[in-house]
Image (cartoon, rainbow, N blue to C red):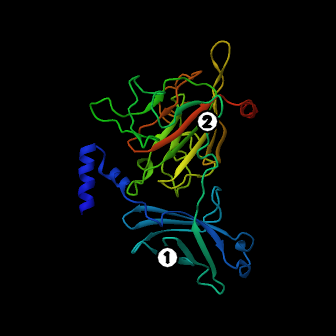
Amino acid sequence: MKNIRILLAAAILTGVGFLHASATDPIPPIMGRWEGKFIDPVKENGYMQTHPDLCAEVVALGGDKYHVRLFPHFFKRAHIFQEFDATATDGKIVFNQAGWKGEIAPGSFTGEAFADGKNPLKFSLKKSDYVSPTMGVKPPEGAKVLFDGKDLDAWQSKTGGPANWPILDHSILEVAPRAKNADVGGSIRTKDQFGDVRLHLEFQLPYEPEMSGQGRGNSGVFLQALYEVQVLDSFGLEGMWNECGALYHTAPPKVNACLPPGEWQTYDILFRAARFNPDGTVSEFPRITVRLNGVLVQYNEDLPDSTLTATSTQKPMPVPKEGPIELQDHSHPVHYRNIWVTPLADSAAALIEKK
Ligand code: MG
């Protein structure tokens, strides 16, 4: 009760929605990615004998509610062995679902598959310690640093005013929701304009277990202020056209590579701007390649229209030669750090030219 009073007071003082205040709750230790193997799979004459790997995602849904997915591989559109909703008691989940039974506890995820058959197959999983291979990568020579924790000199508001998102611990940029009747918060964009560009950034999603869909940890990275690479807490979801790694309304990620909220994640983006005929008409639309946490989620995808209008009835936006990079305020305290750009390297540009 005391915690609820504190959250309510914080929500009133900051103008932040009450449900967002749950981002301050500690992330339960059973939530997250788990990986391991079936034990002694030779007993089983089926798929598991040659594919003993087993992974799981445990997604917090608020209170003691969770969603659990069991499948063979991370970062592939693999089939799901089993998924189910579960309720934790004293921080543990005990499950028995269609032949899969076991227990999920802090530091331990054990159980049996085919528990109802003659040869139940035991498994044991540990919390994944996966870290993106580009986490913390330093800006290469010739890079333009857009944010290194010091200041927001490279950024401005959408209307040309100062960018006023808070910098936390001299290292982290936090999305500031737009305040009513005040020029505070709102999306920010670079003062510089970019055409062909390679972009690296790191982001951390807030823990908002009560929220779902587009209301859960939403932000976005816009190239040329028109083409959104979605930032969203999509941990444990299918990887749809509006989820993390998607080109919003345009292309779903090849696979859902989104990590749980609270973990730092990386985007590495190659953007090839549109090409134009001598009369100014577009000869080639922009194209984009995206790695989320080092995993290829978009490869050389066309961007035939702004992601802002891709499913609306508005007229297509004019295609620019250059534009700013924009970070979206979608009213969620998403964190960013280590943001820099370089011109597209010759090798990357050549790869993109192939299409
Ligand atoms: Mg967004």
- Tell me the kind of residue under disc 1: Phe
Secondary structure beneath label 1: strand
What amino acid type is highlighted by mark number 2?
Pro
Q: Position of residue 38 (x, y in %)?
A: 66, 74
> Which of the numbered marks, if any, corresponds to residue 139?
2
Residue 331 visible in image = yes
Residue lying at the far bottom in this picture: please name it.
118
Between 269 and 171, the residue placed more toward the observer is 171
Q: Is residue 173 above or below residue 32?
A: above
Task: Please state if 55 lies on the left or on the right of 15 as rendered.
Answer: right
- Between 234 and 279, the residue placed more toward the observer is 234
**Residue 342, placed above or below residue 28:** above
The one of 46 and 202 positioned closer to us in this rendering: 202
Q: Callout 2: 10 Å neighbours few (<14), some, many (20+)?
A: some
Q: Position of residue 112 (x, y in %)?
A: 59, 79
**Residue that sits furthest to the top in the current view:** 279
Q: Quadrant of the C terminus?
A: top right
Q: Is mark 1 within 8 Å of ligand 1?
A: no
Answer with the quarter of the image where residue 62 lies: bottom left
Q: Of marks 2 and 1, which one's residue comes earlier in the chain?
A: 1
Identify the residue at horizontal 42%, vertical 27% (top origin): 158
Residue found at x 71% / y 71% = 47
Tally the marks. 2
| Residue 118 horizontal/vertical position (percent) | 65, 87
Q: Quadrant of residue 71?
A: bottom right
Q: Is residue 310 visible?
A: no
Real-space Cα distance between discs 2 and 1? Answer: 46 Å
The residue carrying mark 1 is 95
**Height in image: 11 above or below 44?**
above
